[in-house]
Image (cartoon, coloured by chain):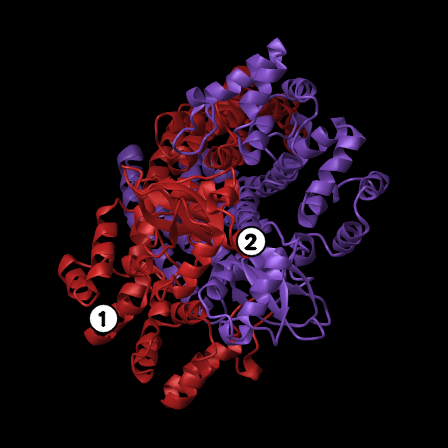
Chain colours: A red, B purple
Amino acid sequence: MIDEFLQDDDYTLNAGLIDAILATVEAGEHGRLVALLEPLHEADIADMLEQISPSERENLLILWGHKIDAGVLSELEEGIRDEVMRDLPDAFLAEAVRELDTDDVVYLVEDLDVPQQEKLLEKLDAVDRVAVEQALTYPEDSAGRLMQREFVVAPNHWTVGQAIDFMRAADDLPEVFYDVIIVDPMMHPVGDVRLGMIMGTERDVLLIDLMPDNFRTIPVEQDIEHVAYAFNQYHMVSAPVVDENGRLVGVITIDDAMEVLEDEVEEDMNLLAGLGDEDLSSRVWRTTKRRFPWLAVNLFTSVLASMVIALFAETMEQIIALAVLMPIVASMGGNAGTQALTVAVRAIATHDLTSANAMRVVKREVLVGLANGFVFAVIIGIVGVVWFGDPMLGVVLGLAMIANLLVAGLAGIMIPITLDKLGIDPALASGVFVTTVTDIVGFLAFLGLAAMLLL
Amino acid sequence: MIDEFLQDDDYTLNAGLIDAILATVEAGEHGRLVALLEPLHEADIADMLEQISPSERENLLILWGHKIDAGVLSELEEGIRDEVMRDLPDAFLAEAVRELDTDDVVYLVEDLDVPQQEKLLEKLDAVDRVAVEQALTYPEDSAGRLMQREFVVAPNHWTVGQAIDFMRAADDLPEVFYDVIIVDPMMHPVGDVRLGMIMGTERDVLLIDLMPDNFRTIPVEQDIEHVAYAFNQYHMVSAPVVDENGRLVGVITIDDAMEVLEDEVEEDMNLLAGLGDEDLSSRVWRTTKRRFPWLAVNLFTSVLASMVIALFAETMEQIIALAVLMPIVASMGGNAGTQALTVAVRAIATHDLTSANAMRVVKREVLVGLANGFVFAVIIGIVGVVWFGDPMLGVVLGLAMIANLLVAGLAGIMIPITLDKLGIDPALASGVFVTTVTDIVGFLAFLGLAAMLLL
């Protein structure tokens, strides 16, 4: 790292460094650009490329002489990756894919058109090419796409010494591996031994005597969301992937699982906010289109809520205070519902909310809704009385508040549970349903009670 | 695993298994309980304990004879962990802490009262005791709390062969380790070599010739949020932790970092939904208290919004359709604002939104807000005209929609950026600010335009 641009202590790219890179690009100083980029980690170069504008990116790549590292390509987010790859010469890309592990090649080519894909895959060695083509036959977001083909196996009769001699003699060990997978003669994994165990054990001990109790294989079609869950739950570092016949076909390592885990939580978060698949660098038009659907649904449900309000137009004409106060009850319900919902969605994703405790959690949400309902009923009741001088208006506000916070808790927990039972991602549609319920109940309870008690 | 209770293929605990365990507890069959629990992973036992009710948990632990594995304790979420530990005999706990790695002991004792803590730590070996006490002096959520003290070092003049001989002879190798840390005579880490590299290299090669380019140490006071980011960004598997003098004091491994990463994303998600620190198993009263503050803030801001509405009470008395329609504009703004906000909060957390691209992202949000504003202006304008037969009402709705979605985009991106600049977690308070802005602007724009154009 060039000293003046020491990384900030939270690992953020130094803003001065990005400015310096852009200035260098503008001045066309190839040597200085290389000097600035050379000490950076591939992931940081990728971040930098994502943060500058498309035209800056193009100029930088030209000045750099398209010397971008293959590793940088696989760190780029999809939109930028495809843009950058479009600009790179074929010969360069061919070189790049040859350098990468098969799982990274899969990431690079999986979204390309078939002809482009074939043109690139042609450049690979026959073995790697078959591996990548095989991986592409597995469903998107399956273990088969995530796994790498580089691993170390040992037959189940080997000793520690034999394994060490084999590894020392091998000239194509994977760049990164954490254990030796023990297989039977049919290539079925029967266990794995961590390198640390092999290191610390006498040469004549059998490998199978070092295998830990907990050994799990991952089916090649397994959803990567479940794979990430298993890594996190069982503190796994690498796991063999097996085909439908139980034969070893690849290995998934924890760094890949970690990325998936982050993506999955982020996806839940985005779905709850009504966001589709969107990157920070997505263009305006794409972003607009991705955000449109949820807003459209929201428009529909808020028109529904307005129809409920319209039922009470006459009541409001007589007591205009109702129109002034009615958003309060609906808004409180929406917030309480979102709280319950967020807890439920995460708990379902982490397998903490199951049929074993569902009823107890539902009961808890109802009681929490009631408890906060009573407290806020008192507060808002007093506000209503003080503001409009009508004690009965305060009573109506308070009762509507209790009803809506109770319903919010119930909807917030029941809706995601029900969606999950129906096989729908509970994060996907829960938000709409819950706020629709709390809006409608909020307006209905407040205006309905007012019509009954105040007129 | 007892065959009839094979784990579901998404790694969910089989519901039948939990029922069987509870039935066994009720029947008091100690032998069968042990048989059912024995094949389970510690993390799954912990999940099961979290999912059953407090009284079931107590009965299970009594029947189990308080034979709970120390590893299970460190997998429990905090609330349940403290409840279970209260019930366990001191002698048992003393045994448990002796079995665990120091980082797990720290997790177990960090929330205990000082006298309880001391009583437990007394049972540790002097070395471990000092290690745990030292860890507890570091700030909560710092690398010093997360790290383990078990690691393997080699002096910087050693060869591969010397390292292998040393490890083979050592009788206290860590249970899990992935690399050998190379240190100078002052215990300053100068690099690390992965075990896989050592395995694949001739005995007479110097370790320092195997060190990768990218080597990072973690300051002991570093916030674990940044540690998790670094692991994910740089695909690290383990990293040495150093004290203020740069001397090696511990090691953090990727499985710990993975857990932190998940917690951090989840925390952002919870903060955005107005949730405090809450577990699924938190009791009603605790949950109610934790959710109260955000609801109170929301009550305050929705009363503010009502005050804005009150300014237009006379206008609404003349055209009651305004009261019917006004929640639509506010609700659309709230949703659009939340979309922009969620993207911004995550992008800040992942260091993708920085001063290098902030202006471009702000511009994008404004354009997206305008674009969706125009589309929904047309739709809602038509709804207004058709429903109430007043073209001018449609125009007012449409204009207010454009204004509010524009403001929503702007508030959604500017508010988290500003909070971050002020050193406040952008996820914490953004939600309140954004929806307050969109509510107030929504009501003000719609009713204000109506007062100007319709009366």
Query: Same subunit under labels 2 and 1?
Result: yes
Q: Is residue A67 visible?
A: yes
The circle on residue A202 is 2
Upstream in the sequence, badge 2 or badge 1?
A: 1
Q: Is residue B321 left or right of residue A352?
A: left
Residue B122, horizontal then vertical, whole percent: 84, 43
At x 55%, y 68%, the residue is B161
Distance from disc 2 to disc 1, alpha carbons, whole Å, reads 45 Å
Nearer the observer, A295 or B126? B126
Q: Does dot 2 land on a helix, a strand or a loop?
A: loop
Dividing the picture into quadrants, the one containing residue A221 is top left
For mark 2, name the chain. Answer: A
Q: Residues within 10 Å of mark 1 (few under 14, many from 20)?
A: some
At x 67%, y 45%, the residue is B104
Q: Does dot 1 land on a helix, a strand or a loop?
A: helix
Which residue lies under the disc numbered 1?
A: A94
Identify the amino acid type marked 2: Glu
Residue B60, horizontal then vertical, whole percent: 64, 20
For mark 1, name the chain. Answer: A
Residue A424, horizontal then vertical, whole percent: 35, 32
At x 33%, y 62%, the residue is A101
**Residue positioned most to the top:** B27
Q: Is residue B210 above or below residue B134?
A: below
The circle on residue A259 is none
